[in-house]
């Protein structure tokens, strides 16, 4: 619950609504700023999506804490180019570490790809972490918007995960005018199993882990490495069956994986650290440097291959 005696909102639907709305802000920034100055486009996108989400969370969930990539003290002090304001800061760390509910957000994941014309592999991540009765906490809801692909992947209140696809609205039959914003259509989302004998592994375009080439050579399968930008876009590609696994190591933060890991787990996928231990969120230090996401049937092959690499 967000405050007092208010009824529990559907946090899953809220996460999806906020991620999709921030995605529309980002599509507008691409149109407005253009691609000539990549730095200006990245900075404006990061800042506008962050401010949109911070304002929406302040209004909709005023009692909750927020951990955003762009609200860290190290970046919140700097003024982004192309805009006139410094980013709104995150909830103070001491307060976040005792909060019941923490929104972990990456307003623009795949910033590099966002600034490259024609690329669709960038995302908005909105996750909710809840402490719960055990005190250890867990990801309670999450949504990954892929605005350039017209898709949002999200957790569902009834359990499981959903794929939300924007359907273009046809012209109004009475007036002949365009029908306005796309109508979303939801279908259940289940992590698909890989084809026998094959394994397509998504890796960073710019920072693929050095052990993945060795891993690929060692696994007794036809392995293809597929470079894709954005952790959210890569994990979505696993859930959409475009690749079979995502392996990353060498650096990342909680906001890079919280929302896509929440969706992946809800969709029945395996999501863990590369040593097989669980992904843990809302830590004092938000570094979470490695991750494996795949269908459960591939998990032991990949974990063993990584361990023995
Ligand atoms: N070695 C590293 N250290 C810190 N962050 C990293 C990293 N490798 C990848 N990331 C972050 O993980 C996200 C996905 O990266 P990639 O596209 O290379 O796979 C990016 O988030 P942002 O775009 O939000 O900065 C990127 O900054
Ligand atoms: Mg990121």
Image: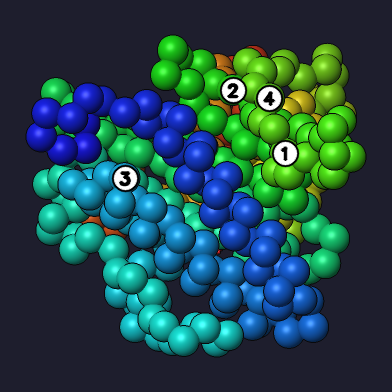
Q: Is residue 204 above or below residue 164?
A: below
**Position in image of residue 82 (x %, y %):** 58, 85
The residue at the far front in this view is: 174
Dot 3 or dot 1, earlier in sequence: 3
Q: Residues within 10 Å of mark 1 (few under 14, many from 20)?
A: few
User: Residue at (18%, 63%) from the top-left corner?
Assistant: 92
User: Residue at (19%, 52%) from the top-left corner?
Assistant: 96
Q: Quadrant of the N terminus?
A: top left
Q: Alpha carbon of mark 3 to alpha carbon of mark 4: how far?
A: 24 Å
Q: Quadrant of the C terminus?
A: top right
**Position in image of residue 56 (x %, y %):** 38, 53
Residue identified by numbered label 3: 60
Q: Alpha carbon of mark 3 to alpha carbon of mark 1: how far?
A: 24 Å
Residue identified by numbered label 1: 182
Q: Alpha carbon of mark 4 to alpha carbon of mark 2: how far?
A: 10 Å
Of labels 4 and 2, the one closer to you: 4
User: Residue at (85%, 60%) from the top-left corner?
Assistant: 118
**Position in image of residue 113 (x %, y %):** 72, 63
| CB-based contact (under 8 Å), mark 4 and mark 2 | no
Dot 4 or dot 2, earlier in sequence: 2
Residue 241, picture quadrant: top right
**Element class at badge 4:** strand
Residue 162: give its label: 2
**Element class at badge 2:** strand
**Element class at badge 1:** loop
| CB-based contact (under 8 Å), mark 3 and mark 1 | no
Q: Cβ(mark 4) to ligand 2 < 8 Å?
A: no
Residue identified by numbered label 4: 185
Residue 61, picture quadrant: top left
């Amino acid at each position: 619950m967000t405050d007092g005696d208010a009824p529990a909102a559907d946090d899953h639907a809220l996460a999806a609504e906020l991620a999709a709305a921030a995605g529309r802000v980002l599509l507008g920034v691409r149109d407005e700023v253009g691609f000539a100055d990549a730095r200006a486009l990245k900075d404006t996108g990061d800042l506008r999506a962050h401010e949109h989400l911070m304002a929406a969370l302040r209004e909709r969930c005023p009692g909750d804490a927020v951990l955003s990539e762009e609200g860290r003290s190290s970046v919140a002090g700097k003024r982004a180019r192309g805009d006139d304001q410094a980013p709104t800061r995150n909830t103070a760390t001491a307060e976040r570490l005792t909060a019941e509910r923490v929104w972990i957000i990456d307003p623009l994941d795949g910033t590099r790809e966002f600034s490259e014309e024609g690329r669709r592999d960038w995302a908005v991540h909105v996750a909710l972490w809840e402490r719960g009765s055990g005190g250890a906490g867990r990801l309670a809801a999450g949504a990954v918007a892929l605005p350039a692909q017209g898709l949002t992947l999200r957790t569902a209140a009834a359990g499981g995960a959903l794929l939300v696809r924007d359907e273009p609205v046809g012209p109004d039959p009475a007036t002949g005018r365009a029908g306005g914003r796309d109508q979303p259509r939801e279908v259940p989302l289940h992590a698909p199993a890989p084809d026998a004998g094959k394994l397509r592994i998504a890796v960073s375009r710019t920072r693929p882990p050095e052990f993945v080439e060795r891993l690929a050579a060692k696994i007794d399968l036809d392995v293809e490495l597929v470079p894709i930008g954005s952790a959210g876009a890569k994990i979505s590609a696993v859930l959409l069956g475009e690749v079979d696994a995502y392996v990353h190591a060498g650096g990342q933060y909680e906001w890079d994986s919280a929302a896509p890991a929440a969706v992946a787990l809800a969709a029945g996928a395996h999501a863990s650290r590369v040593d097989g231990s669980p992904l843990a969120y809302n830590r004092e230090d938000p570094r979470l440097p490695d991750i494996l996401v795949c269908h459960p049937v591939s998990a032991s092959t990949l974990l063993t291959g990584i361990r023995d690499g």
